[in-house]
Image (spheres, rainbow, N blue to C red):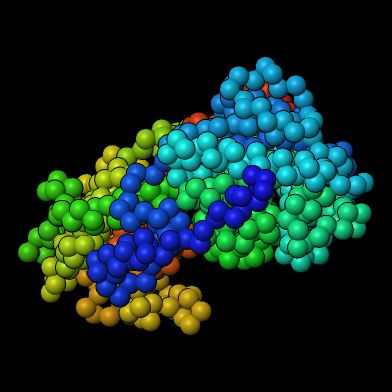
Amino acid sequence: MSLLETTIASIQPANEPAAAEAATLLDTAFPGLPADALGALLLRYLRATGKSAPEALRRCTILCCADHGVAAEGVSAYPPETTVQMTANYLLSQGAAANAFAAYAASDLLVVDLGIAADTGGIPGLVDYKIARGTKNMAQGPAMTRDEARRAVETGIKIAAAIAAQGYTCFLPGEMGIANTTASACIAATLCDLTPEQATGRGTNISDERLRKKVSIVARALAVNAPDARDGLDVLAKVGGFELGAIAGIMLGAAAHHAVTILDGFNSSAAALIAQALAPSVTDYLLPSHQGGERAHGAALRKLGLTPHLFLDLRLGEACGSSITSRFLGLALTMLAALHEGHAPAEDDISLEVMPAQAPKVTDKTFNFYLRTMPELDKSAMAVCQGRLDHLAKPLYSLGHLESIAAELAGISCEERPDKDIGQALLLFGTQGLPDAESIALAAASHDICMPLTLGRLREGLPPTAGFDFGRVTAEDITFDTLLLGLGLTGDIEDELTAALCTEDGGLRYAPEEFLAHVPEHLRLTVSALVGAIVAAAHNSSLILPADAATDLVARYTELLAKDARPYILHTGDLLALGRTRPGVTACASALIVRAALSVLCDMKTFAETKVAPANDGPGKERQKAGTAGA
Ligand SMILES: Cc1cc2ncn([C@H]3O[C@H](COP(=O)(O)O)[C@@H](O)[C@H]3O)c2cc1C
Ligand SMILES: O=C(O)c1cccnc1
């Protein structure tokens, strides 16, 4: 048997007992709580690796680079030489998204040439597994021979084996290959049974005209080659790419060695579809991350049986979304390890602020004070920041919401390029403390991501005005020198508050001026504390990350009352689908997203700095002209 067949034969179904132990521990610690997306990632990881006691995560980012003959049809917004230029960027300028995200996730980086159509001898550190100088044009015939397809997959298997032997358990494959979303569209059309229109997206942000052309090329490639959906190697050979084959091989090799692979963009999902066609149980060893802008990304994830939890509108595929998910997984492992040890948090792990017993008399900082004096965003810092984002060596707007978060942070901090290590804090209000297990897990999480935790203990029986005052004083102190504030509650009042304040479809039921009157009386103190904290933190120019659905709802009403506070609240409900999380956890995850946005801004370099050719089609053609802002 060849390497491919022996690898496929050695993939075992994931190990249930290992995860069962962790599931029992979680269930005991947090009775009655179904696993949120972080818990689901954790259990999937433990099942795949067969580990019950969590160890620190060791991550490896593997960038697979190759060219595509179909680029000659004009299906990308960038010229084919971008592939080799970006490959050089990874290793020489080190200013690509892949570099920024590998640093962000503390992941080691490996860059592999699977088939770049250029001489790559001068790029130091590049691993040479070149199969050919690019694939053939699939619009005219098969992209590669069956033998080449097998070589691509087996190369991935070998890479995975070498990495697994060094102790890595978390693989983050990324890819670079101009025109490869055309190949991925053909793969998805074949394996998910989609029409060319349903399978084809805008890739590097091509114009309407090129999109029409791309759809027709996908249709032609499928008609000319008739790939056989029952035969993964046939699909890869006829309409795939060398780097996609290698990524499929990495997934198979990881599974054979009980390591996990975190999926990234549409391209990695297309590679996973090939791996799944070759060995269906490989999906036990795959973790989802984001669903991005490419049209068939969702369909591919559904076929793989994976549910994404990040919706950041990413269109890149240099292991960006997967790096964020790897941080989520790291966070979940940290919390599990703390629960295993079972030590109560050390005294300085959690600060406690207790509400004064007496309601304050008259305070000078009323709600109206904050309304009148709310600072404005620095529009010019935002514009300069957006100019730089547009010129970073990536397709225009391909980092989606991370770009808008970065620009917003520039406006808030009045810095064109805010420091990556901004201060951040987590503040949770409640009349009760946290149960032991929650304290242990959350203290570990907040420590892990350097987001110190403060509990603001409310006293029942005091009036809402006292709640407002306690909220604003506590938040004002904490946000004096922090740019990020995770804000939430120790208890779960989501259902009660939603029932009181929302319409059936989740809209706001009342005019903002009336909302507090409709909050159930026993919750008014808590809600007032949140309102006070929101306006005070915004007033101190902090970005507020609601830590739970109840806080998010209060923030939605508050920003209608205090319109100038709106830019200081980041609603991550549309960006993150974690399910119902335990106290504070959503804010930790949101903070990891914000930090990813800052890494992009601080660690990536521009086209000019990295000597990569800018766009020749789509909106990037105008915005990314050499010599303009940010260059
Ligand atoms: C500078 C730059 C950096 C990239 N990093 C990933 N891609 C992404 O875009 C390409 C696929 O889109 P299409 O099929 O439209 O060519 C791939 O290289 C993919 O990894 C990039 C593309 C560019 C231009
Ligand atoms: O989702 C992806 O992998 C993707 C999307 C657009 C361009 N390149 C990659």
Q: In the displayed structure, does residue 516 sit left or right of residue 297? A: left
Residue name at image x 68 percent, y 31 percent? 129
Q: Residue at x 21, y 78 (%)?
A: 522
Horizontal placement of 162 versus 296: left or right?
A: left
Picture quadrant where residue 90 is located: top right
In percent of the image, x 84 and y 54: which residue is there?
218
Residue 381, given in percent of the width and then of the height, sits at: 50, 35
View extreme (top): residue: 122
**Pick the front one: 308 or 282:** 282
Is residue 527 visible in the rendered image? The answer is: no
Q: Position of residue 82 (x, y in %)?
A: 73, 31
Task: From the top left corner, tell me how far across and down residue 481 is, in percent.
Answer: 28, 39
- The part of the image, by quadrant, that contains residue 487 is bottom left
Relative to residue 626, is residue 530 drawn left or right? left
Depicted 167 relative to depicted 472: above or below: above
Residue 397: x %, y % from top left = 64, 44
Q: In what quadrant of the picture does the C terminus appear?
A: top right
Q: Can residue 438 be seen by looking at this rendering?
A: yes
Residue nearest the viewer, comparing 459 with 396: 396
